[in-house]
Image (cartoon, coloured by chain):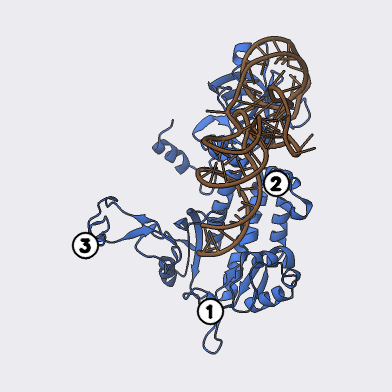
Chain colours: A blue, B brown
RNA sequence: UCCCUGGUAGCUCAGCUGGUUAGAGCACAUGACUGUUAAUCAUGGGGUCGCUGGUUCAAGUCCAGCCCGGGGAGCCA
């Protein structure tokens, strides 16, 4: 292991803007080439390199399919059976850690451009085949969730986490390109953000016998901060203050909600983006939101195509098990491209209600919840607008003030009852991207 | 919290209207294999059918309660 200070000196010597790639070699293991660069960097073909990764399968007593996490692709390392004895070959079990050195040559078999002709192989870590639960086959997400320590070794999880990196990085990239300052709102706070959600309490008081005040209530003056403190549900209030001096800021950090809720869209811990901008109108707000979605999609399509192709196929398999009328019309990649290439629909709340009132599901009485001006849109209404009517992301504005939060801006005196705050109804599309 | 749905081998699942010793693929073990692509072939081991109670000559199968998972709704973002 190189020390942190040594690494820093290596980075420090590089010209600005140049990534320390070392020709595909990582800076902390100078002798090891990532599989991604071995496959993509054609100048490496014909050279001798070393790769290190975990065995996915060992075929025909001869071919190690190796994965190192840099890509979803598993190149095959071809063993010379006269040099690698049966005792060693028996250790190439699924998930064993292996280091291979050899020449990267044009593949003799079909299915890949290059393969490694191994001259030296070392098993760095054995994997007990009788105890290892992940097989080279599709597993259910429920099962993988229970194998929390091993799930990243699967194509599905590793693909998702590589893409999460691309999305997280892209969020910072987008706001930076647009002149926003990354703002860190407090995570432990006394602010309840005007009741945005149920909060987790942060306390060092003894839960069984807390100190009490004169009225018999818990005395939070005795607590760590001298007052009742909780985990943040929103950094909005602090970000607004910063925006009034810095102009443009955004938050992107952990947020906590103690809702008694059990759906895939509700997490107790999630990362939230909150841009705050001085001197911006509603149209700028909508442009910013649409631009962010498209920036992230474009970035993922550019940098994560291997992973998307895999997830696209996985989704198609799952869709095929559903009845025809329940299947999604578009695959994952097609949907991403569709969102990227088409402008988002922008309508007012009143338009949305009118569309719903004229819709087939409403007239046939298929909506579970009533539709009339003044009610809040239910999930089924938003889904109809996005999935059936417009078939693209929709932004609904101009909600009746009565059903929106008080901090949202109204259109002004005389134009009663409307909120000007954009309500990005794109969440259905966005959430299904994940 | 409500609605729907499921729980059978390590994993994914089949098991009809209740009826002999509960099956398949994968995984695992042993053997074979110098061009395989989730390799293949042969042989083998592996089960408290979620739990408890009930109906019945007989329950994986029917009934009730409970536990756990998944999907949806509400809540919320």
Q: Nearer the viewer, mark 2 or mark 3?
A: 3
Give the x, y percent position of residue A247: 46, 70
Mark-to-mark CA distance, 2 and 3:
57 Å
Q: Secondary structure at mark 2?
A: helix
The answer as to whether the residues below labels 2 and 3 share one chain is yes
Q: Quadrant of residue A98?
A: top right
Asked whether residue A133 is in view, the answer is: no
What is the chain letter for disc 1? A
Q: Quadrant of residue A238?
A: bottom left
Residue at 72%, 61% in the rendered image = A341
* Location of residue A288 with respect to A303 vertically, above or below: below
Q: Nearer the viewer, residue B29 or A114?
A: B29
Q: Nearer the viewer, residue A273 or B11?
A: B11
Q: Quadrant of residue B25?
A: top right
Q: Nearer the viewer, residue A363 or A186?
A: A363
What is the chain letter for disc 2? A
Residue at mark 2: A315
Q: Is residue A315 left or right of residue A375?
A: right
Label 3 environment density (alpha carbons within 10 Å; few <14, some 14–19, many ≥20): few
Give the x, y percent position of residue A57: 66, 26
Quadrant containing the N terminus of chain A is top left
Mark-to-mark CA distance, 1 and 3:
40 Å
Which tag, 1 or 2, sits closer to the chain's start? 2
Give the x, y percent position of residue A105: 71, 26
Q: Nearer the viewer, mark 1 or mark 3?
A: 3
Residue at mark 3: A213
Q: Secondary structure at mark 3?
A: loop
* Location of residue A176 with respect to A282 vertically, above or below: above
Residue at mark 1: A401
């Amino acid at each position: 292991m190189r020390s942190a200070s040594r690494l820093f000196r290596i980075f420090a010597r590089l010209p600005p803007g140049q990534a320390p790639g070392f020709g595909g070699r990582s800076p902390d293991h100078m002798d090891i080439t990532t599989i991604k660069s071995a496959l993509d960097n054609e100048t490496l073909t014909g050279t001798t390199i070393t790769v290190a990764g975990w065995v996915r399968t060992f075929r025909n007593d001869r071919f190690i399919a190796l994965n190192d996490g840099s890509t979803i692709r598993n190149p095959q390392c071809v063993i010379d059976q006269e040099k690698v004895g049966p005792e060693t070959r028996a250790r190439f079990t699924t998930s064993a850690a292996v280091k291979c050195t050899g020449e990267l040559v044009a593949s003799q078999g079909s299915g890949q451009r290059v393969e490694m002709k191994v001259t030296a192989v070392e098993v760095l870590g054995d994997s007990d085949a009788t105890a290892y639960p992940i097989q080279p086959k599709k597993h259910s997400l429920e099962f993988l969730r229970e194998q929390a320590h091993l799930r990243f070794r699967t194509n599905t999880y590793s693909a998702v986490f590589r893409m999460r990196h691309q999305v997280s990085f892209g969020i910072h990239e987008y706001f930076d390109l647009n002149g926003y300052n990354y703002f860190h709102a407090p995570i432990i706070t006394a602010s309840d953000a005007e009741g945005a959600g149920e909060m987790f309490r942060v306390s060092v008081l003894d839960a069984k016998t807390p100190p009490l005040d004169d009225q018999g209530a818990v005395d939070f003056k005795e607590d760590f901060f001298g007052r009742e403190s909780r985990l943040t549900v929103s950094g909005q209030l602090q970000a607004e203050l910063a925006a009034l001096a810095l102009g443009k800021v955004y938050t992107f950090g952990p947020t906590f909600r103690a809702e008694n809720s059990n759906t895939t869209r509700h997490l107790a811990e999630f990362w939230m983006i909150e841009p705050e901008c001085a001197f911006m109108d509603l149209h700028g707000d909508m442009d910013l939101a649409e631009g962010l979605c498209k920036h992230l999609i474009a970035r993922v399509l550019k940098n994560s195509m291997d992973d998307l192709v895999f997830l696209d196929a996985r989704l198609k398999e799952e869709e095929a098990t559903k009845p025809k009328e329940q299947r999604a019309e578009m695959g994952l990649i097609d949907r991403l491209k569709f969102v990227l290439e088409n402008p988002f629909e922008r309508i007012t709340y009143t338009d949305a209600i009118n569309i719903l009132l004229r819709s087939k599901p409403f007239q046939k009485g298929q909506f579970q919840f009533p539709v009339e001006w003044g009610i809040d849109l239910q999930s089924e209404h938003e889904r109809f607008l996005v999935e059936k009517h417009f078939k693209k992301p929709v932004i609904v504005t101009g909600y009746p003030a009565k059903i929106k939060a008080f901090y949202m801006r109204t259109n002004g005196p005389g134009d009663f009852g409307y909120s000007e705050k954009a309500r990005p109804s794109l969440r259905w599309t966005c959430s299904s991207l994940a």
